[in-house]
């Protein structure tokens, strides 16, 4: 029982860790895209100052900004989805929402700070693992079923070697109205079938 509790606790810690890192990663992507957006806006401003509105560099910068706005919108959606999954794994009330402090996974040693929780499970011996593996191997179970089927078919074949013998006997009579010669007839009969 204690081993199962430790396993559940370890799985919960690992799920929280996974969702935390996923949320930090999604926020990092949004952070990078926002920085890229600000840089492109500066490039567009410089291009507009140096040339006319119809210049190809201005048009390309505007297209890049429009494309980046779409990517930022998708990244915001991904952050919201990761935040919902993070709160879902925390299993808290709907009114409360938790967020992480870090907005950029690459600024600090966030991944090193989020350590893997200790696993307090008892690890079985190699012999126990091998025994369990052999018992639960699909090939071994299939071979056992084939052996059982072969034993059954062999016992059926042995039974079919011995012939079925059927013996019949009885007493019968025939009254005078149903006999051909009009007399009362009685007698015994015996039959053997192979």
Image (cartoon, helix red, strand yellow):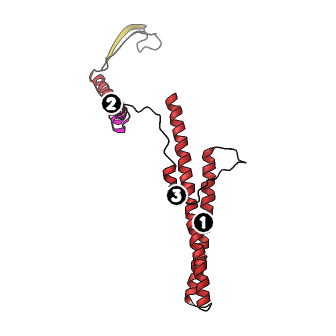
- Label 1–label 2 contact, CB within 8 A: no
Q: In terms of secondary structure, what is the magenta stretch mainly?
A: helix
Q: Residue at x 61, y 72 (%)?
A: 69
Quarter-of-image position of residue 61: bottom right
> In the rendering, which numbered label is found on residue 74?
1
Question: Is the residue marked by circle 2 packed among few (<14), some (14-19), or many (20+) residues within 10 Å?
Answer: few
Q: Is residue 144 magenta?
A: yes
Q: Which residue of the protein is positioned furthest toward the left in this rendering?
A: 161
For label 3, the residue is 108
Q: Secondary structure at mark 3?
A: loop
Residue 159: x %, y % from top left: 30, 22
- The quadrant of the rendering that contains the C terminus is top left
Q: Residue furthest front?
A: 108
- Mark 3 or mark 1, which is nearer the start of the sequence? 1
Q: Where in the figure is residue 166, as x and y percent of width and height?
A: 34, 17
Task: Name the front one of labels 1 and 3.
Answer: 3
Kindly identify the residue that appears in the image at 49 percent across and 46 percent down.
115
Magenta range: 132-147
Mark 1 residue crowding within 10 angstroms, few (<14) / some (14–19) / many (20+): few
> Disc 2 and disc 3: Cα gap in Å?
44 Å
- Which residue occupies 48% across, 51% down? 112
* SS at mark 2 in the image: helix
**What residue does disc 2 label?**
127
Q: Disc 1 versus disc 2: distance between alpha carbons?
A: 51 Å
Residue 129 placement, left or right of 118: left
Name the residue at 36% across, 35% down: 133
């Amino acid at each position: 029982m204690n081993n199962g509790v430790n396993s559940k606790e370890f799985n919960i810690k690992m799920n929280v860790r996974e969702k935390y890192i996923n949320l930090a990663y999604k926020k990092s992507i949004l952070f990078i895209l926002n920085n890229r957006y600000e840089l492109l806006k500066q490039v567009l401003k410089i291009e507009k100052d140096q040339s006319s509105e119809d210049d190809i560099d201005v048009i390309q910068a505007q297209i890049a900004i429009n494309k980046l706005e779409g990517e930022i919108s998708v990244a915001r959606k991904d952050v919201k989805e990761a935040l919902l999954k993070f709160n879902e794994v925390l299993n808290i009330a709907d009114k409360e929402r938790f967020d992480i402090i870090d907005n950029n996974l690459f600024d600090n040693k966030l991944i090193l700070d989020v350590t893997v929780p200790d696993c307090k499970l008892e690890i079985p011996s190699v012999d126990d693992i091998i025994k369990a593996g052999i018992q639960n191997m699909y090939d071994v179970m299939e071979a056992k079923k084939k052996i059982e089927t072969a034993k059954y078919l062999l016992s059926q074949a042995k039974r079919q070697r011995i012939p079925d013998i059927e013996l019949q006997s009885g007493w019968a009579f025939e009254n005078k109205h149903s006999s051909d010669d009009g007399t009362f007839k009685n007698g015994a009969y015996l039959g053997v079938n192979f």
